[in-house]
């Protein structure tokens, strides 16, 4: 049998390093525990954490072929059942030579026959612990602060209990939602499991509507989930969407390192307009020039076409969730504004320019100014707040809060927990 032609998307070493720098950096701090006695009648909370914050298991079948550069990758794993693929910090610390194996096994391939991405041949994957928050608990201490582990503790401090009124919706972050109507098996599976989880959470809590709380790109998954769920279902089951650390319209951050599925997270022309996002000596690329940028960066015609047809419609079609919504964002911290590949060599690590123009990403917020993706955050007002059908919209901007600090440091957690409690108390909008 002939295998379908496949294009391969590898999580590269720079991506892993980049993610380690950008998403996993957050000052550890004590959780905001014990702020209130256990109140009764809480609305159940379902958490969707940020990009790379859900763990994945894999198993290798006989079909798996290790990359030629690392022929040992299948050894001791093939036919041996499930193992932790993302992320096994302990194993990678002990043996960095495993990194190319993990990268190879994490890559996605596009299957033209199915019109969808899937795991590499011989690799089967599953998200760990869907339904509860165990998937957000990593053996990597840095990741625990970047993801929702501290928020879980803070919510337990105000009366939430795992499995009773606190739930976690893990998802496979490698598969971003595709345009409505196109095959997207992973996202479809997430939609049905999340539907059932929300219904179960409500049913277990006296039919109280659920509050969805998202961090970072988890918000994109939740927003897409909601906008594709029938409106009567949303109104019957969802009390509130609390979206932390995300605007609309994607992020220039993603321009630094791409793989097929992240295309949906690229900056949207509707939000970023004509601003130069990728700078080279020869020419600049705005959000509207992303197809040209992708072609120049070596993506095939097919991949560029998939950006246009599969990914781009997602941010272009972004709509208000039409359930009450609160958005909480940190501001006042230098944030990636554009990336510079001055010599036009897109395989190099780019220089990153933040709004201040000092070219340094500093999640600790040392140099002050400018706003954290303020374009994307302000666009929320346009896309959600100004929609006449949107029942309630509140935007909270917290000065001097980093992306990860919002869900890990004491002040960030306090604000976030306050907003969740406020959503709980609201009787009607
Ligand atoms: C990580 O890998 C080590 C060594 O292969 C293994 O013993 C451990 O169980 C793995 N961790 C998880 C969470 O599976
Ligand atoms: C690219 O954009 C920068 C501003 O970020 C501007 O100074 C420069 O002139 C532009 N270059 C080209 C080739 O248009
Ligand atoms: C581009 O950058 C990569 C990585 O730094 C390097 O290996 C390669 O030689 C560069 N290509 C050109 C044409 O300079
Ligand atoms: C910003 O936050 C950092 C770390 O939380 C703190 O050390 C610093 O004093 C704060 N700066 C301002 C201007 O509030």
Image: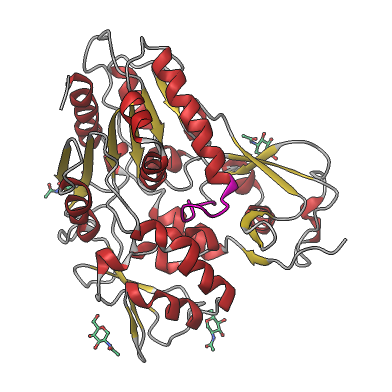
- Check the image and report above or below for 28 versus 312: above
Reply above or below: 28 against 35: below
Vertical comparison of 67 with 63: above or below: below
The residue that appears at 39% across and 28% down in the rendered structure is 46
* One can see residue 384 in this view: yes
In the drawing, does residue 416 fall left or right of residue 115?
A: left
Q: Where is residue 51 drawn, in percent x and y?
A: 44, 48
Q: Residue at x 25, y 9 (%)?
A: 39
Q: Residue sitting at 42 percent across and 14 percent down?
A: 203
Image coordinates of residue 160 in percent, x first then y, are: 34, 17
- Point out the residue furthest to the bottom here: 282
**Quadrant (top left, top right, bottom left, bottom right) of the C terminus:** top left
Count of labels in the image: 0
Relative image position of residue 271 (x, y in whole percent): 25, 63
Magenta span: 175-185
Q: Quadrant of the N terminus?
A: bottom right
Residue 378 % position (x, y): 17, 55
Residue 205 lies left or right of residue 260; in this view the side is left
Picture layout, residue 45 above or below residue 305: above
In the visual, does 405 lie left or right of 118?
left
Residue 117 drawn in magenta: no
In the image, is 104 to the left or to the right of 245? right
Q: Which is the main secondary structure of the residues drawn in magenta?
A: loop
Furthest toward the right, the residue is 1
252, 274: nearer the viewer: 274
Between 89 and 55, the one nearer to me in the picture: 55
**Image quadrant in which you'd find residue 7:** bottom right
Residue 180 among those drawn in magenta: yes
Which residue is found at the position 37% from the left and 78% from the top? 289
Is residue 137 shown to the viewer in this render?
Answer: no
Q: Nearer the viewer, residue 318 or 243?
A: 318
Scheme by which the image is coloured: secondary structure
């Amino acid at each position: 049998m002939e295998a379908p032609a496949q294009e391969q998307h590898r999580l590269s070493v720079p991506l892993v390093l980049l993610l380690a720098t950008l998403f996993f950096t957050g000052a550890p701090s004590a959780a905001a525990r014990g702020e209130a006695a256990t109140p009764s009648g809480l609305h159940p909370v379902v958490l969707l954490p940020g990009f790379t914050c859900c763990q994945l298991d894999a198993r290798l079948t006989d079909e798996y072929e290790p990359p030629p550069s690392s022929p040992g990758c299948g050894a001791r794993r093939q036919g041996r059942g499930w193992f932790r693929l993302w992320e096994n910090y302990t194993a990678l610390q002990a043996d960095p030579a495993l990194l190319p194996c993990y990268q190879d096994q994490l890559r996605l391939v596009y299957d033209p026959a199915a019109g969808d991405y899937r795991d590499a041949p011989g690799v089967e994957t599953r998200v760990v612990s869907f339904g509860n928050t165990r998937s957000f608990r990593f053996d990597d201490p840095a990741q625990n602060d970047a993801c929702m582990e501290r928020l879980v503790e803070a919510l337990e401090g105000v009366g939430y209990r795992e499995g009773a009124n606190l739930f976690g919706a893990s998802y496979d972050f490698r598969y971003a939602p595709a345009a409505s109507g196109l095959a997207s098996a992973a996202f479809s599976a997430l939609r049905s499991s999340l539907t059932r989880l929300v219904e179960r959470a409500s049913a277990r809590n006296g039919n109280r509507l659920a509050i969805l709380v998202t961090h970072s790109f988890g918000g994109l998954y939740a927003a897409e989930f909601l906008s594709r769920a029938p409106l009567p279902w949303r109104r019957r089951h969802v009390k509130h969407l609390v979206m932390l650390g995300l605007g609309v319209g994607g992020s220039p951050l993603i321009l630094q390192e791409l793989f097929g599925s992240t295309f949906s997270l690229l900056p949207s022309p509707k939000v970023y307009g004509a601003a130069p996002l990728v700078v080279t000596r020869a020419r600049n690329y705005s959000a509207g020039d992303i197809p040209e940028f992708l072609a120049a960066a070596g993506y095939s015609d097919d991949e560029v076409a998939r950006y246009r047809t599969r990914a781009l419609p997602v941010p272009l079609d972004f709509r208000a969730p039409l359930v009450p919504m609160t958005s909480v964002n940190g501001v006042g911290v230098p944030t990636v504004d554009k990336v510079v590949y001055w010599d036009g060599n897109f395989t190099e690590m780019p220089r990153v320019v933040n709004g201040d123009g000092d070219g340094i990403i500093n999640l600790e917020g040392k140099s002050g100014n400018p706003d954290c993706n303020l374009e994307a955050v302000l666009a929320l007002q346009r896309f959600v707040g100004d929609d006449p059908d949107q029942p309630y919209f509140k935007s909270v901007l917290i000065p001097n809060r980093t992306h990860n600090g919002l869900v890990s440091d004491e002040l960030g957690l306090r604000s976030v927990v306050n907003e969740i409690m406020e959503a709980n108390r609201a009787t009607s909008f």
